[in-house]
């Protein structure tokens, strides 16, 4: 499913507002300058997802996810390569020392969960508020595994909204992607809302 | 369904529970919180956390509340990033380096029949987990450190050397630089042991390790290979630089008082080999050549350096 150039621009802007708000909160929380790059947005099929976010199906990834219900039903996930998520935790928590061969500790998972929770909830609420689609998120969860296993349950779903971004703290950048898996009717509904949003923006400009 | 005494249930929960309304005022404060803060429910009701705990200016909590109340989006505040929400002193944990209760906090949206929104805040005490985790991490570090070290000299041991060398050879091939290997042996160590005893022998080994270390770069590693044999591995080092470093070491050892022995009583011999990515070989072959050169140095009168070919 292709986005029109106008839909693509509008989604990019919404995603960028969400990313900026998330970065602001993360910077305050961590007392460090955190930057999230302008997200690259797309709507792809589950099969196209690995290519869209630069992950091989056999790659080990770390994932924070929140189930969505309400106007949009599906799952929002923030995905990083596992080794990058460890670097990220070390960057963020600072004193945490990850031993080679020893898996991430529970409290490091908690840190990742909170970080993901901020990014997911801010981006999703920015999008749903602007598009008037009231959506509830469940408590965030964390998992690690092979990418294809993590997205296995999505194979029946029609589409994935992808927001790919890079998080920078200090001088290091970590690539991650927020992916929102939705059913075909929800995707169509989302695009309709996006068109309405664009029409509303055009009306506002005319009245000015 | 039977009407349950919810307030009583909340008071029996082993976690802190408070409910905050849209004005950020507390409208529920359970017994767990009352016990730990010495603030009872009546005192907490109708006040904000900032009013209950002056100086409690928590922007992360304010943001989380906003997300919950406005967007109905649940939030977690991890111990790793926030340490705690409610300041609760726990004197019995101070000996473990923790003076405040460590907390994991969850915020979720609630609505009453009239549609008014609330934030349900649950606080879990994770202090013991944090203390246990810190102790296990420290222990794991110590074990990892100890498993890589020789206990007498505290230098790296063979086990670490082989792991390091495998990685270094890969890097050498990738970046096309050489790795020098110096095999060192204390001359006449057996007679030092026989004449002065094992205690003095151990002091000589430790002192020798210290002198050699002074002549190395930060990137080099010094390994106790076994007995009185040592290995120095030098990344990004060609044969000329390795020979220069080896002679500096030989002279440094000869001129130093080591243990209770006077300068000149302790000397060493060194054999050198160099790994060249243009002529790949295994780490074992690299060590074998350095060992061969070392014995040439021994057979040529000791207290000297014999280099191999690059």
Image: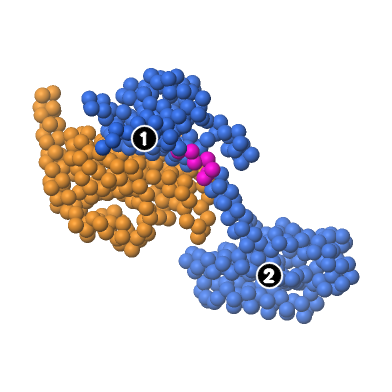
Chain colours: A orange, B blue
Residue toward you, B196 or B296: B196
Residue at label 2? B225
Residue at horizontal 52%, vertical 45%? Answer: B129
Q: How far apart are marks 2 and 1 (CA)?
A: 57 Å
Residue B34 appears in view: yes
Which quadrant of the figure has residue B255?
bottom right
Residue at label 1? B107
**Residue numbers of the magenta segment:** B124-130
| Chain designation of label 1 | B
Residue at horizontal 51%, vertical 25%? Answer: B38
* B187 on left or right of A12: right
Q: Nearer the viewer, mark 2 or mark 1?
A: 1
* B125 on left or right of B292: left
Whether the magenta-drawn stretch holds residue B199 is answered as: no
Residue B104, percent across and down? 44, 39
Which quadrant of the figure has residue B184?
bottom right
Residue B167, percent across and down? 53, 66
Q: Is residue B156 above or below residue B29?
A: below
């Amino acid at each position: 499913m292709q986005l029109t150039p106008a839909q693509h621009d509008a989604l990019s802007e919404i995603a960028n507002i969400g990313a900026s708000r998330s970065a602001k909160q993360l910077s305050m929380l961590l007392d460090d300058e955190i930057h999230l790059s302008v997200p690259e947005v797309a709507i792809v099929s589950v099969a196209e997802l690995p290519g869209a976010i630069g992950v091989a199906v056999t790659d080990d990834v770390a994932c924070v996810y929140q189930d969505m219900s309400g106007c949009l039903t599906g799952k929002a996930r923030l995905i990083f390569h596992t080794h990058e998520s460890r670097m990220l935790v070390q960057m963020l928590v600072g004193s945490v020392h990850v031993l080679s061969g020893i898996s991430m500790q529970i409290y490091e998972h908690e840190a990742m969960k909170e970080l993901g929770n901020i990014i997911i909830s801010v981006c999703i609420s920015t999008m749903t508020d602007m598009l008037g689609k009231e959506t509830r998120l469940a408590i965030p969860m964390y998992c690690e595994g092979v990418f294809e296993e993590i997205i296995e349950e999505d194979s029946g779903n029609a589409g994935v909204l992808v927001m790919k971004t890079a998080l920078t703290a200090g001088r290091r950048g970590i690539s991650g992607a927020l992916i929102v898996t939705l059913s075909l009717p929800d995707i169509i509904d989302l695009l309709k809302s996006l068109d309405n949003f664009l029409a509303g923006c055009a009306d506002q400009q005319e009245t000015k | 369904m039977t009407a349950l005494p919810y307030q009583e249930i909340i008071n029996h929960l082993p976690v802190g529970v408070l409910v905050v309304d849209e004005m950020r005022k507390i409208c529920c404060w359970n017994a767990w919180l009352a016990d730990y803060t010495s603030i009872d429910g009546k005192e907490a009701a109708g006040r904000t956390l900032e009013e209950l705990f002056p100086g409690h200016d928590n922007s992360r909590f304010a943001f989380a509340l906003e997300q919950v109340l406005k967007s109905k989006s649940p939030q977690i505040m991890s111990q790793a990033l926030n340490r705690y929400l409610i300041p609760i002193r726990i004197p019995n944990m101070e000996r473990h380096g923790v003076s405040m209760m460590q907390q994991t906090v969850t915020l979720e949206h609630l609505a009453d029949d009239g549609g008014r929104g609330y934030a349900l805040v649950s606080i879990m005490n994770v202090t013991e987990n944090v203390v246990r985790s810190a102790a296990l991490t420290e222990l794991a570090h110590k074990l990892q450190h100890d498993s890589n070290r020789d206990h007498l000299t505290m230098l790296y041991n063979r086990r670490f050397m082989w792991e390091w060398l495998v990685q270094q050879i890969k890097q050498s091939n990738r970046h096309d630089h050489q790795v020098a290997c110096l095999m060192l042996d204390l001359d006449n160590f057996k007679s030092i042991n026989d004449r002065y005893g094992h205690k003095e022998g151990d002091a000589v080994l430790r002192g020798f390790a210290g002198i050699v270390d002074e002549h190395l770069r930060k990137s080099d590693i010094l390994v106790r290979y076994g007995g009185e044999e040592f290995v120095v591995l030098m990344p990004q080092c060609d044969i000329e630089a390795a020979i220069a470093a080896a002679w500096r070491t030989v002279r440094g050892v000869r001129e130093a008082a080591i243990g209770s022995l006077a300068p000149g009583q302790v000397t060493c011999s060194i054999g050198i080999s160099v790994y060249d990515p243009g002529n790949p070989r295994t780490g074992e072959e690299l060590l074998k050549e350095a060992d061969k050169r070392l014995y040439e140095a021994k057979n040529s009168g000791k207290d000297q350096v014999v280099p191999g070919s690059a």
